[in-house]
Image: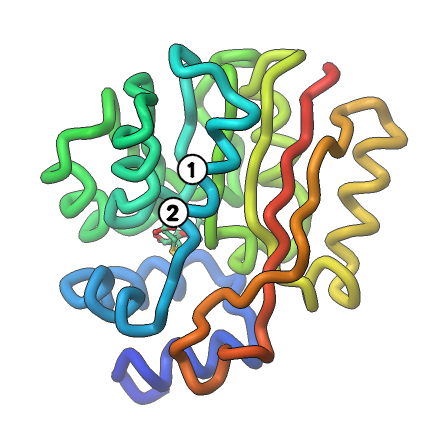
Amino acid sequence: MSQDPQSISSNWAHTPPVNASKVEADYDFLADDYDDLIKEWGYDGPRIGAELAKQFFSLEDSILDAGCGSGLTGESLYNRGFTNITGVDISQKLLDKATQRQVYRELVKANLQQQLSWPDNTFDATYSIGVLTYFPDNFPLLEFCRVTRPGGWVLFSQRVDLFEEGGHGRAYNSMESQGLWQQKYISQPTAYLPGHSEYAQNILVYYLAYQVTK
Ligand SMILES: C[S@@+](CC[C@H](N)C(=O)[O-])C[C@H]1O[C@@H](n2cnc3c(N)ncnc32)[C@H](O)[C@@H]1O
């Protein structure tokens, strides 16, 4: 694959990347330019997600920002009054950027496709914006439910194509049938990177909020 941000991101629009080692390498490569690139592409996930968090979370909640990247999501939560935020990501270079923002209590490097190190019910809420594209199945969401206390929240974005045709929506419904969580909110389809030629109106996302039931 040619190593330039436009072609990496364009490939991702057509073929969501689910190989965690490759995703890690690509994000390490993009890290220095990440904030500028997604600004140029019109990314608004951190603002939209944080506005929803204000509707569903309490300000004192402990929040796991899963796939925190360079910390734009944590910063947006912090600017709205949330201060108990832990970040986790697979890219050390992005974690280094997130550290500089000084909005996280703790930052951890981990692969969200594997079992998380936190015990059951550690957090009041798990928050994952722009990250679900990189998961082939719902294992990470089972982990999000496990580390989030009953009554707490799992709030995330997911691509509409992966939700509808990719089978992810079915998997979330099945988690609901199993009594793991209940869907409390689903947004209208929303442009993800409106300023990126390959995404524009082609790749839309839902923002979803589920309440954990066990
Ligand atoms: C589009 S960025 C979103 C970052 C941040 N949430 C935001 O909205 O700015 C996707 C992030 O997911 C992380 N990621 C992807 N797959 C991962 C995995 N298996 N484990 C941990 N982090 C992962 C990437 O390293 C990257 O930081």
Q: In this view, does 62 lie to the left or right of 76?
A: right
Q: Mark 1 — residue? A: 50
Quadrant housing the N terminus: bottom left
User: What residue is at 24 percent from the left and 67 percent from the top?
Assistant: 30
For the image, the number of numbered tags is 2
* 105 relative position to 56: left or right: left
For badge 2, the amino acid type reads: Pro
Q: What element carries label 1?
A: helix
Q: Where is residue 204 in the image (x, y as percent from the top left)?
A: 60, 67
Q: Which of 209 and 174 is in front in this view?
A: 209
Name which residue lies at 50% across and 79% down: 200
Mark 1 packing: few (<14 Cα in 10 Å), some, or many (20+)? many
- What's the mark number on residue 179? none
Q: Is mark 1 within 8 Å of ligand 1?
A: no
* Furthest residue in direction right, as rendered: 177
Q: Which colour scheme is used?
A: rainbow
Q: What element carries label 2?
A: helix
For label 2, being within 8 Å of ligand 1 is answered: yes
Circle 2 sits on which residue?
46
**Viewport quadrant of the C terminus:** top right
Q: Position of residue 150 (x, y in %)?
A: 66, 12
Within 10 Å of disc 2 (Cα), the crowding (few <14, some 14-19, many 20+) is: some
Circles 2 and 1: CB distance less than 8 Å? Answer: yes
Residue 95 to residue 189: above or below: above
Q: In which quarter of the image is residue 138?
A: top right
* Residue under the point 77% across and 51% down: 169
In the image, 7: left or right of 139? left
Distance from disc 2 to disc 1, alpha carbons, whole Å, reads: 6 Å
**In this view, 132 is above or below 213:** below
Q: Is residue 54 above or below residue 37?
A: above
**Residue type marked 1:** Ala
